[in-house]
Image (spheres, rainbow, N blue to C red):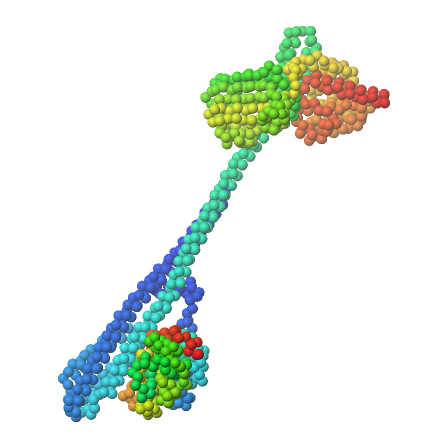
């Protein structure tokens, strides 16, 4: 009772108080799902198409897959409400959270303990990161969470500000390029998404004789499926449970999970992204773009 | 007045009520906020408790699963192909069942987190593990099932974790909204109290001002009533005095006639003198009455103050009573002063009465008169010019006055006497009379040491003799004549008096009781009438209209008005005193005889000079 009185009085007395929950949009005709365009459209369609089909079947909702043309486009689409659900990277999620109050839904089990790997040539005998002072260094793309933002954040935290610690810094156009630069000796040391580096090693895209993993960053949360805050709660629950139900014991699920590079999905929360948020605060989006 | 006050009281009540409502409303909201805060604290505690419980159970389940995995590994490792179950597995399964039971209970406790599906999956997972283990023909160890089970445990654990974090974030978010609201409300309370305080103060001031105005209004109304009473009394007294004047004119006139006719009889003469003196005194009394009624025609004349005060002593002693001693100090020969003796009389009476009232337990009043010379270097009171002065001092040894009272003592309506005892006009009148005579009055007093009034009047030479002596001389020289005099007067007794008196002086007297009759005489033949004497206030045709027409018919005649009224009243009747001379009633025969003779002689001198020219 007190709460109601309080709420009424608050609404009356504080005009500055805006209430986002006041207007619940009607249930969307179709749930539009956007995914981070970090690969070619074809690759993304193969990777996410079956997942979307599964979600449609599991929830009974009509779901459409949307592949934005760029990270910025994705953020804009989410901001305008064109996208109801989006698979963000760590950095894009934090941006969407700040711009559009995006709400985390689920993430792959691997995303919770995500790592970036420092790669050196296999022949290099030096044992720790500190031994590479004054050498040449390669980050991934500027806007990459695992290839740039988080490594830079942890290097700063380890008292190794990259611009001072290394003789020169380069930015690759993708994690595979970083791996190649290290292999080819273009840089002495590079940092890349561990997932990709490991799979390149596993798939023998790059020989274990030519490069090795020197070290990893501390774990941080990276990719996440997020929804609009205003999305109906029951739809959120439906989607979440569909993701959580994916289980390797089920042969159909196994293929989907393999495509996602996951053992399963876990509920995601805002608190999981404290590290990324701290990195964005410290480094700033302006520095990221430069 | 009371309605205004009532209205103000009403506004007061509204202001109080509004302030109270604002403060109450603000306090209500503050209390509500506080209660909300408490509710949130409780919710927070519940979330924390719940999260702790769920994480504990989840971890327990996780550990049990780990143990189960190791037992199965050991089992398969020890004897491959042999499908036996380690004895401890049943214990672990039992523990896991208990964990799942606890999770189900948590679900009942905390319905906000919708984890039905996950819990169901967990239980399914457990069931399939149990089923596999219970099947002695199983081909493989249930490692896949256990991995799925572990995933479900972690999902459940994180579901709780995220729900708890979200709930806490919501609470924090609301708390952030509460702080500015609280500050705003405190601001409202403070503002309401301040505004209320200011408004009440403003209102109180306005009320006080209003009250002061009311008091002033009431005072001035009372003063007006007082004045109206005085005015009415004055009119009454003035009317009576006027009628008395007419009677006194007859008494004085007839006495004069009798004195002339009985010149040889000494005893009769003495009696008639007494009558004459008494009539004079009565005339001066009526003059005072007229002065009080504001109908007095002031007649400044030269006289000796000594004589006036000599005549007043009996009156003064009677006035002050037996407890008070009256002392009179004076120089034998005083300069004459020029003002209306009746008014001077009033001045002295007023000052003596004030002195008496200042000595309720008796004392001494001193009247002192002396001549004074103010030279160019001497200190002169007031703005008096240098020259000769007569200084009259009235002093007492009564209660005295403080400085404040002294400053206001000459203000009209200022009185220290009880209401109804004094008019507050006495000293104001004194001040006015002295000022009109180009004199000055000063007061000197100290509380407990008595009061002293000093009057300075210009001194104007000596040796005039007393009024009585003047009267005797005048009587001896009552001039007569043989000219024709027309007397117009509505008062029959005065008409008779003038007719008899003027006839005895040798004049031919024509009488008329009104203007119409008078004009009949005037129409006869120009030049037959030498003097026309007319009353001013008469019925039908007033004196001024009559005189105007009469003088047109008899252009050589001399016109003289006589009136018992003040100059103001006479002027209102249309009389122009500068063209036609005016004699104030009461008068005696000598006065009118002298006026007539003087004007006739003037006319004769003028006509002679015209003929000579």
Left or right: residue B1 compared with residue A225: right
Q: Nearer the viewer, residue B480 or A258?
A: A258
Q: Position of residue B358 (x, y in %)?
A: 49, 24
State the residue at coordinates (17%, 89%).
Answer: B77
A201, above or below B441, in the image:
below
Q: Nearer the viewer, residue A259 or A157?
A: A157
Q: Position of residue B372 (x, y in %)?
A: 60, 20
B295, above or below A188, in the image:
above
State the residue at coordinates (35%, 84%).
Answer: A189
Looking at the image, which residue sits at the far left?
A: B87
Q: Position of residue B204 (x, y in %)?
A: 46, 46
- Asked if residue A57 can be seen in this view, the reply is no
State the residue at coordinates (69%, 20%).
Answer: B494
Left or right: residue A201 compared with residue B560: left
Q: Nearer the viewer, residue B543 or B600?
A: B600
Image quadrant of residue B335?
A: top right
């Amino acid at each position: 009772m007190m709460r109601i009185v309080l709420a009424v009085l608050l609404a009356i007395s504080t005009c500055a108080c805006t209430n986002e929950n006041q207007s619940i949009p009607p249930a969307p005709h179709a749930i539009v799902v956007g995914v981070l365009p970090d690969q070619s459209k074809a690759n993304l369609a193969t990777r996410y198409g079956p997942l979307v089909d599964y979600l449609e079947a599991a929830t009974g909702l009509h779901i459409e897959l949307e592949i934005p043309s760029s990270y910025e486009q994705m953020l804009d689409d989410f901001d305008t409400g064109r996208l109801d659900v989006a698979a963000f990277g760590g950095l894009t999620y934090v941006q969407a959270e700040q711009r559009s109050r995006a709400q985390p839904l689920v993430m792959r089990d691997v995303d919770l303990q995500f790592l970036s790997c420092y790669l050196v040539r296999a022949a290099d005998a030096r044992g720790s990161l500190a031994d590479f002072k004054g050498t040449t260094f390669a980050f991934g793309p500027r806007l990459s969470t695992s290839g740039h933002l988080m490594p830079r954040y942890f290097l700063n935290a380890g008292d190794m500000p990259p611009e001072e610690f290394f003789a020169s810094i380069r930015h690759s156009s993708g994690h595979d390029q970083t791996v190649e630069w290290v292999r080819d000796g273009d840089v002495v040391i590079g940092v890349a998404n561990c997932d990709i580096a490991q799979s390149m090693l596993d798939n023998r895209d790059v020989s274990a004789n030519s490069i090795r993993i020197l070290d990893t960053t501390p774990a941080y949360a990276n990719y996440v499926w997020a929804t609009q805050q205003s999305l109906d709660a029951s739809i959120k629950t439906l989607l979440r449970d569909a993701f959580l139900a994916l289980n390797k014991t089920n042969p159909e699920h196994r293929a989907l999970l393999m495509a996602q590079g996951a053992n399963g999905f876990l509920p995601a929360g805002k608190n999981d992204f404290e590290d990324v948020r701290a990195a964005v605060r410290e480094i700033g989006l302006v520095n990221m773009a430069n | 007045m009371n309605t205004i006050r009532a209205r103000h009281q009403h506004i007061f009540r509204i202001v109080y009520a509004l302030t109270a409502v604002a403060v109450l409303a603000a306090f209500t909201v503050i209390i509500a906020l506080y209660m909300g805060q408490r509710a949130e604290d409780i919710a927070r505690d519940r979330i924390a408790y719940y999260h702790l419980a769920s994480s504990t159970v989840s971890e327990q389940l996780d550990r049990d699963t780990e143990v189960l995995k190791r037992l199965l590994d050991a089992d398969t490792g020890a004897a491959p192909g042999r499908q036996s179950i380690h004895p401890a597995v049943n214990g672990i399964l039992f523990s896991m069942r208990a964990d799942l039971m606890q999770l189900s209970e948590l679900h009942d406790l905390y319905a906000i987190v919708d984890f039905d599906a996950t819990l169901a999956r967990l239980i399914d997972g457990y069931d399939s593990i149990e089923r596999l283990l219970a099947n002695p023909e199983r081909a493989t160890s249930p490692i896949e099932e256990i991995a799925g089970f572990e995933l479900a445990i972690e999902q459940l654990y994180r579901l709780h974790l995220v729900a708890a974090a979200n709930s806490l974030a919501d609470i924090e978010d609301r708390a952030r909204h509460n702080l500015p609201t609280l500050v705003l409300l405190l601001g409202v309370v403070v503002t309401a109290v301040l505004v209320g305080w200011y408004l009440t103060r403003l209102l109180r001031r306005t009320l006080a001002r209003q009250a002061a105005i009311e008091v002033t209004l009431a005072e001035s109304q009372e003063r007006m009533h007082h004045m109206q009473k005085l005015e009415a009394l004055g009119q009454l007294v003035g009317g009576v005095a006027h009628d008395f004047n007419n009677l006194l004119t007859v008494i004085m006139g007839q006495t004069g006639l009798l004195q002339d006719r009985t010149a040889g009889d000494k005893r009769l003469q003495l009696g008639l003198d007494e009558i004459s003196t008494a009539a004079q005194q009565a005339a001066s009394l009526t003059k005072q009455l007229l002065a009080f009624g504001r109908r007095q025609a002031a007649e400044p004349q030269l006289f000796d103050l000594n004589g006036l005060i000599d005549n007043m002593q009996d009156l003064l002693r009677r006035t002050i009573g037996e407890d008070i001693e009256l002392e009179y100090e004076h120089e034998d020969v005083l300069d004459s002063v020029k003002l209306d003796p009746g008014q001077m009389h009033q001045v002295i009476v007023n000052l003596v009465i004030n002195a008496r009232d200042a000595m309720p337990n008796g004392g001494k009043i001193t009247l002192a008169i002396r001549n004074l010379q103010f030279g160019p270097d001497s200190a002169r009171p007031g703005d008096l010019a240098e020259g000769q002065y007569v200084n009259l001092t009235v002093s007492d040894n009564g209660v005295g006055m403080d400085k404040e009272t002294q400053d206001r003592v000459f203000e009209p309506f200022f009185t220290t006497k009880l209401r109804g005892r004094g008019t507050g006009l006495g000293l104001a009148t004194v001040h006015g009379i002295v000022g009109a005579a180009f004199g000055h009055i000063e007061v000197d007093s100290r509380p407990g040491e008595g009061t002293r009034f000093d009057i300075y009047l210009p001194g104007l030479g000596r040796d005039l003799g007393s009024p009585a002596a003047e009267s005797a001389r005048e009587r001896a020289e009552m001039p007569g004549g043989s000219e024709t005099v027309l007397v117009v007067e509505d008062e029959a007794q005065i008409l008779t008096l003038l007719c008899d008196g003027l006839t005895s002086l040798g004049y031919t007297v024509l009488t008329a009781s009104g203007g119409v009759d008078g004009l009949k005489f005037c129409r006869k033949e120009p030049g037959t009438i030498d003097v026309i004497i007319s009353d001013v206030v008469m019925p039908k045709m007033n004196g001024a209209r009559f005189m105007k027409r009469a003088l047109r018919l008899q252009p050589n005649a001399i016109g003289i008005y006589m009136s018992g009224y003040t100059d103001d009243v006479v002027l209102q009747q249309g009389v122009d005193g500068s063209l036609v001379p005016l004699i104030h009633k009461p008068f005696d025969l000598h006065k009118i005889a002298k006026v007539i003779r003087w004007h006739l002689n003037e006319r004769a001198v003028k006509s002679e000079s015209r003929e000579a020219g």
